[in-house]
Image: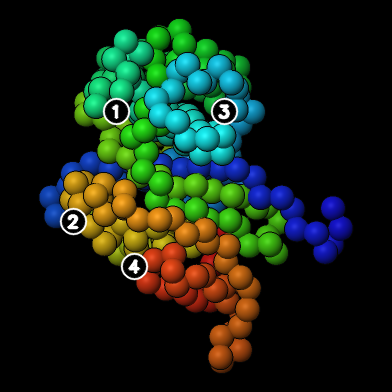
């Protein structure tokens, strides 16, 4: 790689796990460990880089839905990362495949919970764990919500797909204690207000997707509204405002209600 060649953006995925709240849907957010090299201490959605095991062709028999190679890999990565970082499992029993089939509950999540760290460390392939319990990942439950690619001038770059998904009933979210140090449910508006008050650190793409989520008033509204919307890729472009301040530009058609972000506001 030369100084003129930006590093490749690595495929990544994240899930906005949603549950019904009092006034608006609540989303699961986890706090990144302070010693992590990316977004240290920030409130984020469970997620991370895709692993080689996420592309294993063996997944075809243990997933629900047909989404093509990139989307299948990203959705598998998103569900695996949610399991590793929160303990929540978006899967169903293979004997009851299909979009209308229920997701597994706390009983199965509890059986899988002791293996979270081993899966995270790569000691146990996630596919082997799902196969052992005769489950199938519910890729069909994920609604494509956003697609962000890290700007070219950044040293570490990610090609990140965001999804929303209704959290399975009965499963309890718990942080992993390694990459994350807390797990909280809160509305998008509450999260944004915490950042504004200086009570939380939220990086730019996370904040923009919280702003987008704040447009809806219920889970049903979220699924209906975002399920029918095309996803526009956001690759923030560096530039300057009319006043000469360094900034990033994002496309208006992406639907975030904002097209300019000052670089001084961008946290990494």
Mark 3 residue element: helix
Q: Earlier in the sequence, mark 1 or mark 2?
A: 1
- Local packing at callout 4 (Cα closer than 10 Å; few below 14, some 14-19, many 20+) is few
Residue 180 is situated, as x and y percent measured from the top left of the image, at: 46, 39
Q: Which residue is drawn at 57% across and 66% down?
A: 236
Q: Do the residues labelled 3 and 2 touch (CB within 8 Å)?
A: no
- Residue 41 in sight here: no
Q: Earlier in the sequence, mark 1 or mark 4?
A: 1
Q: Earlier in the sequence, mark 4 or mark 2?
A: 4
Displayed quadrant of residue 210: bottom left
Mark 4 residue element: loop
Q: Distance between the residues labelled 1 and 4?
A: 41 Å
- Local packing at callout 3 (Cα closer than 10 Å; few below 14, some 14-19, many 20+) is many
Q: Mark 4 points at which residue?
A: 197
Q: Are marks 1 and 3 in contact (CB under 8 Å)?
A: no
Which of 200 and 23 lies nearest the eye of the viewer? 23
Q: Nearer the viewer, mark 1 or mark 2?
A: 1
Mark 1 residue element: loop
Q: Mark 3 points at which residue?
A: 54
State the mark number for residue 217. 2
Mark 2 residue element: loop
- Establish if 101 lies above or below 28: above
Q: Residue at x 84, y 62 (%)?
A: 3
């Amino acid at each position: 790689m030369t100084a003129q060649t930006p590093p490749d953006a690595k495929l990544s995925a994240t899930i906005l796990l949603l549950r019904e709240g009092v006034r608006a849907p609540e989303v699961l957010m986890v706090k990144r460990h302070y010693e992590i090299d990316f977004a240290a201490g920030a409130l984020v959605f469970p997620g991370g880089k895709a692993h080689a095991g996420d592309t294993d062709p063996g997944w075809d028999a243990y997933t629900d839905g047909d989404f093509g190679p990139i989307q299948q890999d990203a959705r598998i990565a998103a569900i695996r990362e949610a399991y590793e970082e929160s303990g929540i499992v978006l899967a169903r029993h293979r004997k009851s495949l299909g979009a209308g089939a229920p997701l597994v509950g706390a009983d199965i999540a509890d059986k899988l919970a002791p293996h979270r760290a081993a899966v995270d460390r790569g000691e146990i392939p996630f596919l082997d764990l799902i196969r052992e319990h005769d489950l199938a990942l519910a890729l069909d439950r994920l609604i494509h919500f956003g697609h962000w690619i890290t700007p070219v001038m950044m040293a570490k770059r990610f090609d990140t797909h965001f999804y929303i998904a209704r959290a399975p009933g009965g499963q309890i979210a718990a942080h992993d204690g390694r990459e994350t140090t807390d797990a909280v449910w809160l509305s998008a508006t509450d999260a944004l207000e915490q950042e504004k008050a200086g009570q939380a650190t939220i990086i730019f793409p996370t904040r923009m997707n919280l702003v987008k989520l704040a447009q809806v008033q219920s889970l049903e509204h979220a699924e209906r509204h975002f399920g029918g919307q095309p996803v526009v890729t956001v690759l923030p472009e560096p530039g300057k405002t009319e006043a000469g301040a360094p900034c990033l530009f994002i496309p208006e058609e992406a639907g975030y209600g904002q097209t300019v972000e000052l670089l001084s506001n961008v946290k990494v």
